[in-house]
């Protein structure tokens, strides 16, 4: 049976007393992204490593194969920045579309 990454991460975050706001701020994403992580059965290793780094938790204890991915890395600031800007732009676009549909 495979481990549901999002549920396991949510359990660790909540058990250790971290708020969703703190996780979002420390990982430079919005709250919706954090909730999306929680609902994802599989997350990229770099996301898991990044969350672990900001909450000072070693997820390799819970996910032994996490360290076996030679491509796993914490994204550098520039790479993370453009991804966050892109996600933010998509979320704004979706909100604008929703408002247009709500008016119709």
Image (cartoon, grey):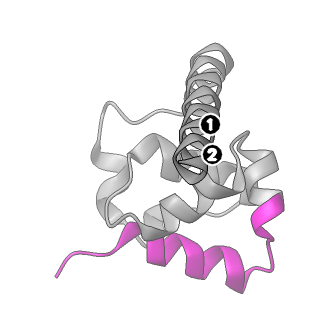
Q: State the residue at coordinates (66%, 21%).
A: 81
Image quadrant of residue 82? top right
**Does the magenta stretch mainly form a helix, a strand or a loop?**
helix
Q: Give the residue drawn at x 51%, y 47%.
A: 101
Tell me if 21 is positioned left or right of 51 in this view: right
Chain part drawn in magenta: 1-21
The verdict on residue 17 being magenta is yes
Give percent across and percent down for residue 39.
44, 69
Q: Nearer the viewer, residue 69 or 79?
A: 79
Name the residue rendered at 70%, 57% in the picture.
31
What residue does disc 2 label?
Answer: 99
Q: Are marks 2 and 1 in contact (CB under 8 Å)?
A: yes
Q: Does 7 appear above or below 95?
A: below
Provide the residue designation for mark 1. 96
The tally of labels here is 2
> Which sits in the foreground, 91 or 29?
91
Badge 2: how crowded within 10 Å, few (<14), some, or many (20+)?
few
Q: Residue at x 32, y 67 (%)?
A: 41
As helix, strand or loop, the secondary structure at mark 2 comes to helix
């Amino acid at each position: 049976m495979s481990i549901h990454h999002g549920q396991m991460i949510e359990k660790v975050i909540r058990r250790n007393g971290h708020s969703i706001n703190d996780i979002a701020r420390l990982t430079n994403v919005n709250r919706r992204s954090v909730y999306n992580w929680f609902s994802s059965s599989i997350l990229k290793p770099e996301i898991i490593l990044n969350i672990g780094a900001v909450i000072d938790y070693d997820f390799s204890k819970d996910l032994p194969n996490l360290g076996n991915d030679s491509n796993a890395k914490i994204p550098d600031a520039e790479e993370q920045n453009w991804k966050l800007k892109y996600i933010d732009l998509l979320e704004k676009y979706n909100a604008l579309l929703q408002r247009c549909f709500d008016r119709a």
